[in-house]
Image: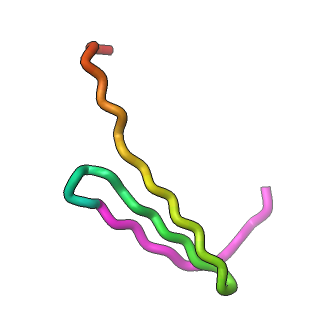
Amino acid sequence: MDEVTGDGHAELLDDGSIDITFYHNGDEAILKAKRDTSSTAC
């Protein structure tokens, strides 16, 4: 794994999902995540 530096932010959206944005040397990466709901108990 290579060490990296940069900047970013995360935003919790009204629907419970999260958007995470990373910036480094003019590049941008966006991660979007939403919790998977299940009708069965764990």
Q: Which range is magenta?
A: 1-12
Residue at the (23%, 52%) spot, across then down: 15
Q: Quadrant of the C terminus?
A: top left
Splitting the image into 4 quarters, where does residue 34 fall?
A: top left
The residue positioned 52% from the left and 65% from the top of the image is 30
Residue projecting furthest to the left: 14
Q: Nearer the viewer, residue 5 or 25?
A: 25
Residue 11 lies, in percent from the top left, at: 33, 66
Residue 33 placed where, x, y %?
Answer: 42, 49
Q: Residue at x 32, y 52 (%)?
A: 17
Residue 22, image x and y in percent? 55, 71
Which quarter of the rendered picture does the N terminus lie within?
bottom right
Q: Nearer the viewer, residue 37 or 24?
A: 37
x 35%, y 39%: residue: 35
Left or right of 40: which side holds 7? right
The picture quadrant where one finds residue 29 is bottom right
